[in-house]
Image (spheres, rainbow, N blue to C red):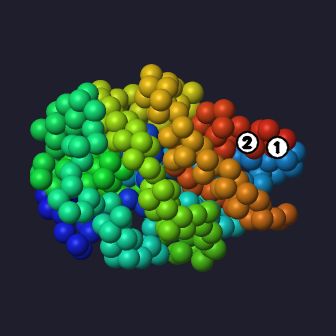
């Protein structure tokens, strides 16, 4: 997919919803699907003492065909819901406009390259990763750090056979349209792009370093991520996804900008959609659910009962 880089933006079209490197790893689903071994799946019901007020699914944004069919509990919860809530509707994105904007903001001008901004250790890591990547060096070096981070992550997943067309959010958007259910977005494409555009050189370099560290460990983590997601083991998945931040404390502020800071805004916008008598089905990247500042803990802190299905 990334054999060339042109103004048509085939790469950029796939970026809007994956602003954190950790979220990319949730796509590693490598064996035929099965119900979780202990009966749990990566989905929760949120209630206030009565019936469910919300179903909350931790999504994988890229997948392979063997992800489907999904565990029955996910499809049953969707059928019982009144509307669909997603980060962003992938079927309604202005891909060309986003690609053009990203290319304007994401490339160095006047012959500048990324090498001038890299410390020796990160430069060596990038060279090592580029050897394993299909992205030509002459193309990669023109990209600003955040753009290169996302490009390499998505390129790696595509090279392993994972496709955004098979992501869970797209799957349920298409089901909602077929069933005539309302679809609500928690963010806009422009808002997500502005988070990336707003990264200064220091944060952009941190983002790139986090991406490169995960790129190096990609093969070894795939099976672990798959097993944790498929078994509904959110604690194990959290340990895997956040390990790069725990092992590299300097990256912690970046996690706040790319993931946890967005959780607060999502919760604020979700509130009006949980009107009495309405039960939304919410699909967001699984990373947003996890950790002490994740959406699951936010609901618990607000007094809701959160039960894994």
- Check the image and report above or below for 25 versus 10: above
Q: Is residue 94 left or right of residue 231?
A: left
Q: Is residue 200 left or right of residue 133?
A: right
Please tell me which residue is depicted at 49% across the width and 62% down the height of the picture. Answer: 194
Q: Where is residue 259 shown, x and y percent of the image?
A: 55, 45
Q: Where is residue 296 shown, x and y percent of the image?
A: 68, 41
Total numbered labels: 2
Can residue 225 be seen by looking at this rendering? yes
Q: Is residue 296 left or right of residue 153?
A: right
Can you name the residue that lies furthest to the right here?
49
Q: Residues within 10 Å of mark 2 (few under 14, many from 20)?
A: some
Please tell me which residue is depicted at 82% across the width and 51% down the height of the picture. Answer: 51
Q: Where is residue 190 shown, x and y percent of the image?
A: 50, 68
* Quarter the C terminus occupies: top right
Task: Determine which quarter of the picture holds residue 265.
Answer: bottom right
Please tell me which residue is depicted at 66% across the width and 67% down the height of the picture. Answer: 83
Q: Where is residue 82 shown, x and y percent of the image?
A: 69, 67
* Quarter the N terminus occupies: bottom left
107, 88: nearer the viewer: 107
Pointer 2 residue: 298
Pointer 1 residue: 302
Please tell me which residue is depicted at 28% across the width and 42% down the height of the picture. Answer: 117
Q: Do the residues under discs 1 and 2 have CB atoms within 8 angstroms?
A: yes
Can residue 76 be seen by looking at this rendering? no
């Amino acid at each position: 997919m990334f054999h060339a880089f042109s103004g048509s933006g085939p790469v950029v079209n796939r970026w809007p919803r994956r602003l954190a490197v950790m979220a990319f790893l949730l796509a590693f689903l490598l064996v035929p699907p099965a119900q979780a071994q202990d009966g749990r799946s990566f989905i929760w019901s949120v209630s206030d003492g009565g019936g469910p007020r919300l179903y909350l699914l931790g999504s994988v944004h890229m997948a392979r065909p063997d992800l489907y069919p999904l565990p029955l509990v996910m499809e049953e919860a969707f059928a019982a819901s009144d509307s669909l809530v997603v980060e962003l509707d992938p079927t309604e994105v202005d891909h060309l406009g986003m690609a053009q904007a990203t290319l304007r903001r994401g490339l160095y001008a006047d012959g500048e390259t990324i090498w001038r901004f890299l410390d020796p250790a990160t430069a060596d890591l990038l060279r090592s990763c580029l050897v394993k990547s299909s992205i030509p060096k002459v193309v990669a070096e023109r990209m600003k750090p955040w753009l290169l981070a996302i490009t390499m992550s998505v390129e790696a997943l595509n090279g392993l056979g994972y496709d955004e067309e098979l992501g869970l959010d797209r799957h349920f958007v298409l089901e909602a349209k077929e069933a005539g259910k309302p679809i609500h977005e928690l963010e806009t494409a422009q808002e997500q792009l502005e988070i990336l555009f707003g990264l200064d050189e220091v944060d952009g370099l941190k983002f790139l370093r986090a991406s490169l560290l995960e790129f190096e460990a990609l093969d070894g983590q795939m099976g672990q991520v798959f097993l944790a997601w498929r078994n509904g083991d959110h604690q194990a998945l959290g340990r895997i996804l956040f390990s790069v931040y725990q092992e590299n404390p300097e990256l912690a502020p970046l996690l706040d900008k790319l993931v946890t800071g967005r959780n607060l805004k999502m919760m604020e916008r979700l509130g009006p959609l949980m009107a009495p008598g309405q039960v939304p089905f919410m699909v967001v990247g699984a990373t947003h659910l996890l950790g002490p500042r994740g959406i699951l803990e936010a609901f618990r802190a607000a007094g809701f009962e959160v039960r894994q299905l």
